[in-house]
Amino acid sequence: MFPRLQEVSPLAIKANPYIAENLFDQWLSLPETNSLVKSLLNNVKGGAPLNVSGTSTGSNAVTSNSLPSMFPAGSTPPLSPRSLSGSPRVMKQRVGPSAFSSPLKLVNEPVKELIPQFFFKNGRPLPNELKERCLFRISQFFYGHADGLQMHEFKPVTKEICKLASFFSTALFRKIDVNGSGIVTREAFVDYWINGNMLTKDTATQIYTLLKQPDFKYLTQDDFKPVLRELLATHPGLEFLHSTPEFQERYAETVIYRIFYYVNRSGDGRLTLRELKHSNLIVAMQHADEEEDINKVLRYFSYEHFYVIYCKFWELDTDHDFLIDKENLIRYGNNALTYRIVDRIFSQVPRKFSSKVEGKMGYEDFVYFILSEEDKSSEPSLEYWFKCIDLDGNGVITRNEMKFFYEEQLHRMECMAQEPVLFEDVLCQMVDMISPQDESYFMLRELKGSKLSGNVFNILFNLNKFMAFETRDPFLIRQERENPNLTELPFKFFMVSMVILCNKLLSSSRVILGEKWSNGINLLIFSNECFEDCQ
């Protein structure tokens, strides 16, 4: 037992703090205290845990269970009402020996949290359950074909296993059959589709990987040609074209031009994976594969749409050299366009011509033009015409630029003995349509944000559509605002043009299937439904 110090009242300590210091000095001078302190220091140096209650398990420890007390029995101050678990002193308690035998190192090391891998260069590994199920399905399709599948037998694998449109069958087959043996074995397919992590990729990435050339990071127009050739060879809605190879080629070209017009937003002819993922092309491809009537696939693949585009081009191309000039284009839509806008188109400001002939527009250039002209609600069209009107290329359309193009419209109205509409009046109309931030100019993003922006361009350079807009039926206007899809362009344009072309065919006395039409165009065979709709 340690000797008890002189009893001191707690009130006395509180009134005279120096008394506590004197008592502490007396306590440290006790022999038993010196022995206890030395014992604790030896334990710390030896790596033993520090016992806060004063006991120690070391060999040099004192056998007492308590520190020498400076307080009388029963007069020990009460503990803090806070729980031990919430005490910051307990939470910061040093535990465990230190490698360097230093009390400063006796702290808990932070637990390292293992973050699961989230990036896989070749795609996320396939779960075992899904892999086994897929391998079982593959074995079913390859059952009875120990040597492998030939190209004409591979289409069910493309549709059922890969979930791709059937006209990707040839492209997939050749991607696997790198040696050109004409056979794809089960092992080769599993190695490419399963082990190559193609199964875990989304559909857009799968198609992108199948079509692109090995050294490129984008798709070109040539990459789509094998797919279109197989579509033409296998689709029941295009079977009638088998006897006219020249029109098969034109149809494929038109589809590819339409794809790049809408999907390749950069306009550089290099279609990226990002652009492919942000488009509706994958959905349109699946629709074309499932729909027997190709004309019901309005996006990209409709044969009737191709027919209208091609016939419009052929009518303007009077010498049939597959090139048109300014004088040819000015006749488009019954001379609907102004000379000033045609000059801007041929200055190649909105788009560089693919034609290498100076002052001539090729078929691809015409496809871009007609899609822009007949579908002014699309972003590619708005960008096309914005560049035409923006004379100084500063990114805004000013009043003076709009007035420059409208002057010719005003002159044409006067020549036709129509009541002219002053520029100040149409300017107010256009401002109401677009609601720009600054009424002195229009920005491209403001035009893209308005559903009526196409009318602005019609007012400036297309007289026929401007007059139609001025005399429109108020009931139709309300109907279009409530449901814009009722008159969605360019589908409405293609429908009307198709009826006109059908009527021309039916009224011609020399219309014979497979023979020459009166204007020199090879007659393309329509479906019976088309003729019935036109009559």
Image: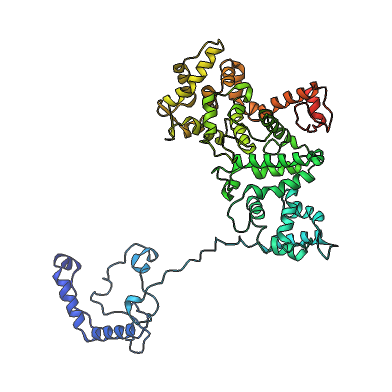
Tell me the quarter of the picture where residue 437 sits.
Answer: top left
The answer to whether residue 203 is left or right of residue 73 is right
Image quarter in which the N terminus is found = bottom left
The answer to whether residue 260 is left or right of residue 388 is right
In this view, 358 is above or below 150: above
Front one among 517 and 444: 517
Front one among 21 and 366: 366
Q: Where is residue 306 in the image (x, y as percent from the top left)?
A: 70, 35
The answer to whether residue 238 is left or right of residue 476 is right
The answer to whether residue 238 is left or right of residue 335 is right
In this view, 481 is above or below 227: above
Identify the image's colour scheme: rainbow, by chain, secondary structure or one colour.
rainbow
Front one among 21 and 274: 274
Q: Where is residue 191 in the image (x, y as percent from the top left)?
A: 70, 65
Front one among 215 and 285: 215
Q: In the displayed image of the protein, which residue is found farthest to the bottom?
A: 59
Query: Does residue 412 appear anywhere in the picture?
Result: yes
In this view, 75 is above or below 327: below
Query: Does residue 453 appear anywhere in the picture?
Result: no
Tell me the quarter of the picture where residue 83 sits.
Answer: bottom left
Q: Where is residue 95 in the image (x, y as percent from the top left)?
A: 39, 75
Which residue occupies 51% across, 16% down? 411
Which residue occupies 33% across, 68% down? 89
Tell me the quarter of the picture where residue 11 sits.
Answer: bottom left
Q: Position of residue 520 (x, y in %)?
A: 76, 30
Image quarter in which the C terminus is found = top right
Which residue occupies 63% across, 63% down? 125
Which residue occupies 72% across, 60% down? 176
> What is the count of numbered marks?
0
